Amino acid sequence: MRVAASTSRIRRLSLALLLALNLLNYIDRYVLAAVEPEIRHAFFPPEVTPGAAARDQLMAAMAKTGSLATAFLLSYMLAAPIFGMLAERMSRWTLVAIAVAVWSLATGASGLAETFPLLVLTRCAVGIGEAGYGPAAPTMIAELYPVEQRGTMLAWFYMAIPVGSALGYALGGTVSQHWGWRAPFFLVAPPGLLLAGCCLLMPAPPRAAAVTPRHPRATVADYGSLLRIPSYVLATLGMAAMTFAIGGFSFWMPAYLHDAAHAGDLATVNVRFGMITVVTGLTATLVGGWLGDFLRRYVSGAYFIVSAAGIVVSAGFIVLMMHAADGGPSPSPLLWVWIALAVFFLFLNTGPSNTILANVTRPTVRTNAFALNILVIHALGDAISPPILGAIAGRSWDAALSVVCGMMVLAGILWFWGAAFLERDTAAAEAAPDFS
């Protein structure tokens, strides 16, 4: 009885701390998006030029500031596989503590950057720090909870994405309005250092305690076997298309609402979009995780189906949003309604899509499966989408958002395809020799 109570306590503490870290993770990412227009003005001030020359200058400036997201994600995705291997060879909480301290210090340094190249370097350092956390965290949760509960537990963990993103928008927009674009970066750093210290006080989680004994180290052949799991491959490719869409959508949304939709000043649109993201995104993430677990009992491939249906419906609401924004100097009041519904259905896949990764991979390769997933989805997704969409948006916001919708539909197609393989691949992972 005492052992069971202790394990339950470790589970709760681990989930709570990992959730807090993920929350800070996304606050940091979207503070940058919130202050992008101010950074653009500070480092690439507009010149008084007529017509086409002005549009070319704006397009070039937006492509450059979009590269800040690319710099972060390149370092993040390239470092993730390295840290995935380290997570199997050292204390995960120690690794996470070091990673969080690095990204927090780098975030503070972003506010000190006096030149644009220095700002790029600090964002690269943030990416390296977050790479130490990204692969380890969901794996720890997956190993602490059995397959029947993973969708719900991972949904709680990933609810930090909409909440953290919203807080990043609101914090960045509000604080920068009063104290400039550097201040939000300074504000985010100290909580990260505090949470890094908390990680060092955590008891070591039993690896796969809920489902399996300590397993041997993975081999190269084990990693190659991931490519022979259809559910893993299709989930990852769908997440890459989704990440391209959501990375560009979220990075440029404050600029779109301010510059193109004329929905208010920068602080106002950041706060409004942030509030919509936190309410609808939080609700959708938890509903998606619960819905996937519930439908799994009745529908084959439920996690894929929930993910696919949600993202296709979201694309439809983005089209309606574009039409509502075409109302001239003031947008249609329905603009914010369509945005809210688009965000809700976009986040519906967060829990189910990550649950697929956990359920179809064996414990020997699970950490590295998440690391490989991080590498692929960011290499093909939001590492490239902000500058690409920024360059397109410099000429046409409608064209940029049409690309976003197209990638969302592609994600839906890949996920609907994956539904046929999910039950078979989950059963194979549970029946593997290292899975009791």
Image (cartoon, rainbow, N blue to C red):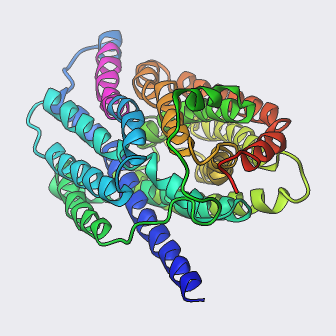
- The chief SS type of the magenta part is helix
Farthest residue in the top direction? 52
Q: Is residue 11 visible?
A: yes
User: Percent position (x, y) of residue 322?
Assistant: 61, 35
User: Residue sitting at 52 percent across and 53 percent down?
Assistant: 138
Q: Quadrant of the C terminus?
A: bottom right
Which of the 4 image quadrants contains residue 145?
bottom right
Is residue 69 found left or right of 216 in the rendered image?
A: left
Residue shown at 35% from the left, 17% from the top: 55
In the image, residue 233 sits, relative to residue 430, either above or below, namely above
For this orientation, the residue located farthest to the bottom is 1
Image spot of residue 131 (x, y percent): 36, 42
Camera-side residue of 429 and 183: 429
Q: In front: 144, or 295?
A: 144
Is 157 placed above or below 202 here? above
Residue 255 makes an appearance in the image: no
297 to the left or right of 213: right
The structure residue drawn at horizontal position 67% and vertical position 35%, both measured from the top left corner, is 232
Q: If the image is split into quadrants, where does the N terminus sit?
A: bottom right
- Image-quadrant location for residue 429: top right
- In this rendering, the count of numbered labels is 0
Coordinates of residue 235 in the picture (x, y in percent): 67, 36
41 within the magenta span: no
Instruction: Where is residue 338? Give x, y as percent.
Output: 65, 48
Which quarter of the figure has residue 59? top left
Give the extent of the magenta segment: 56-73
Q: Is residue 355 above or below residue 44?
A: below
In this view, the residue in front, 426 or 307, is: 426
Position of 164 with respect to 428 (left or right) is left
Establish if 171 lies above or below 12: above
Q: Is residue 73 left or right of residue 315?
A: left
Q: Nearer the viewer, residue 320 or 251?
A: 251
